[in-house]
Every structure is written in C-alpha cells, then in structure tokens.
Image (tube, rainbow, N blue to C red):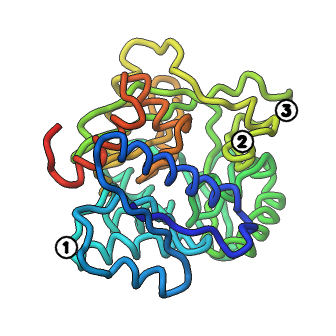
C-alpha cells in the first residue's frame, strides 16, 4: 500500500487533509490484513529515497494507491500510478490521465458536458482581473481550478458581487496558483454518488449533505472546515447521511448522470460524484477519483449503507484492480 507523507513538521497550509491520508492508510492496511492480504505500507515524500524503496525487488503483486501528491502539490498525484504502470504493477483506482483531468476542474467540466451530463455554467481565468462571468448567472462560487479535498472553499467563496469575486480569485491564485474557476452557485439538494467496480458498474446507495442546520445567511456549502475540522460547527452542521425521499425517477437520473460523468473522466475501480439537483435534473459539480477511504467518510459510509464493511470495500477495490474474483 502506498500513500503520501505529510510535509515536514506536519503543518502545511492544508494539513488536515494530509492527516486524513494518514488515517485512511492505517485503516486500509488494517482492513486488507483482515481479509488475509500481506501488506507492506510505504509512504512517499519529496525525498527520492522514499521512491527508491518502491523499486526494490521483488515488486509487489499489486499496489493499493492512496497517494495524493507530494507535500500538497496536487499536480504530482499522477506520478505514482504512472510509475506503477511502467513497472507493470497493478494498482487501485484511477489511471494517471484521469487523475490529471479531474484535478483540472475546467477540463473535467468540458468532458462531462460532452458526455451529455449537465454541469453548472462557469468561467475560468488565470488572472483575477480576467474573471468575467459572461453567461454565468449569480450568485457565483469562486474556487481553485486545480485542487481537491475542498481546498480553498469557505463561506466567502459565494458572492453575487463581481469585485468581491475578483478579490476572492486573487487570494486563491496567490495560494494555489492558476486557474481559478467561477461557477453559478446552485442551492438545490446536494447528493453524493459512490461508484464501485472495474467499470464503475456498482452504484452505491445515494448520500445527501443536509444544510438545514446552518445559521441564517450561511450559504449551503461544504467548506474545507466543514470537511476536515471535525470539532468545528461547520463540520457538525453539514454531516452527510442517507438520502431523503426523492421524487420519482430523480434517484435513477442521479445514478445515471454520476456514472456517465465518472466514465467520461476516465475513472475506474471506485469514484464519488458530487451533484446538485436543479428541479429534477442532476447537475454534476465534481468527479472525485480515488475518494477518501477513512472509515466514516462519505464513500465508506455509502458502502456501509449497501451492507459492505470497510474490509469488504477495500477488498473489492483491490480485486477490481487485479481482476481477481470475489
């Protein structure tokens, strides 16, 4: 099993997400052992020595890939599966091209839309002054165009004022680099759709993020703190749960849109798709390859709703990668 190491000192700008990888790695290793697999855990960082250990013979039969990039650099995430492919080692989850695509939200949006799946109207820019919301109805959400794990998202991300949107864009560009993405902010119900299998043929029970407990005036939005700061009010007020009653046909449309979007982005093995409902139409916000496998996180919780233990889930993900039968 391979995962990224946190930055030296463990205090990077998004340290909570780095700690999340450590927790997921420990849980996945334990679940794999519970299923009878022999597990060697390897953490990769900026030190080339950590990577040289991966090349030692004998090579592993397969690699469970939890690597999310070197020290908070998302663009380095595809490096590990690319190396594993060159070594002929099967690995779990998405291939390099899919990881690269999904890290660029503007490019992923184009692929999803080309597959006939609805996405929010949006605009992209490399400079704050160039951000022009032509054809993008307000209110808007402004977010980094090349990060994941809700990085850069807080309650100031939503605005109807162009000057405020550009100020927010300038902050994100300094912190995360280009591009920055401005999208129409949809306030409909938010669903998470988990997908599992070599061709994502298993659709797990839908989950829903409820924003009913948020204080008046707060945008219905899952922020970085709401995702990672487990003792914060934002986290406690936005806990996902099983989907509430949906109108006839809506759940089927959501499942279909999610799978089409994930396949359009080249995902395999497992993925999670976040979408919002515009009336009865599912609108895809984001495709997440290799979603968080920490017990209690959204994807394992959806698997649990389907009767899969954490050990069952990680075993299925591994077998999807190796072609082994259950």
- Is any part of residue 88 visible from this angle? yes
Q: Residue at x 52, y 38 (%)?
A: 295
Q: Is residue 90 left or right of residue 203?
A: left
Q: Quick one: which residue is furthest to the bottom in this view?
A: 48
- Residue beneath disc 3: 217
Q: Residue at x 25, y 42 (%)?
A: 197
Mark 3, other Cα within 10 Å: few <14 / some 14–19 / many ≥20 = few
State left or right for residue 207 relative to residue 150.
left
| Circle 1 Cα neighbour tier, 10 Å, few/some/many (<14 / 14–19 / ≥20) | few
Q: What is the quadrant of the C terminus in the image?
A: top left
Q: Quadrant of the N terminus?
A: bottom left
| Mark toward the start of the polypeptide (3 vs 2) | 3
Disc on the earlier residue, 1 or 3: 1
Read off the residue under disc 1: 88
In which quarter of the view is residue 212 placed? Answer: top right
- Left of 124 or right of it: where is 321? left
Residue 230 appears at what percent x and percent y?
A: 73, 40
- Mark-to-mark CA distance, 2 and 1: 39 Å
Residue named by callout 2? 226
């Amino acid at each position: 099993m391979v995962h990224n190491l946190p930055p030296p000192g463990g205090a990077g700008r998004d340290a909570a997400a780095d700690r999340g990888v450590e927790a997921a790695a420990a849980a996945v290793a334990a679940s794999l052992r519970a299923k009878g697999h022999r597990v060697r855990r390897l953490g990769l960082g900026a030190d080339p020595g950590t990577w040289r250990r991966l090349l030692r013979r004998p090579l592993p039969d397969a690699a469970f890939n939890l690597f999310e990039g070197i020290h908070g650099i998302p663009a380095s995430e595809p490096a590990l599966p690319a190396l594993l492919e060159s070594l002929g080692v099967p690995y779990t989850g998405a291939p390099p091209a899919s990881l690269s695509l999904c890290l660029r939200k503007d490019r992923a949006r184009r692929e999803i839309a080309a597959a006939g799946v609805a996405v929010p109207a949006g605009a992209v820019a490399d400079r704050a002054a160039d951000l022009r919301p032509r054809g993008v109805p307000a209110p808007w959400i402004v977010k980094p165009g090349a990060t994941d794990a809700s990085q850069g998202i807080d309650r100031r991300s939503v605005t109807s004022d162009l000057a405020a949107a550009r100020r927010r864009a300038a902050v994100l560009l300094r912190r995360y680099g280009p591009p920055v993405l401005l999208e129409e902010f949809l306030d409909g119900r938010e669903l998470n759709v988990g997908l599992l299998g070599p061709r994502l043929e298993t659709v797990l029970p839908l989950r829903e993020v409820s924003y009913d407990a948020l204080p008046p005036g707060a945008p219905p939005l899952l922020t970085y703190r709401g995702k990672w700061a487990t003792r914060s009010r934002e986290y406690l007020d936005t806990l996902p749960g099983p989907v509430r009653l949906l109108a006839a046909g809506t759940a089927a449309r959501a499942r279909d849109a999610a799978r089409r979007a994930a396949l359009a982005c080249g995902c395999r093995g497992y993925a999670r798709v976040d979408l919002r409902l515009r009336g009865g139409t599912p609108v895809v916000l984001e495709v997440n390859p290799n979603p968080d496998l920490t017990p209690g996180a959204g994807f394992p919780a959806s698997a649990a709703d389907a009767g899969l233990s954490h050990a069952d889930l990680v075993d299925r993900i591994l077998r999807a990668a190796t072609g082994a039968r259950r």
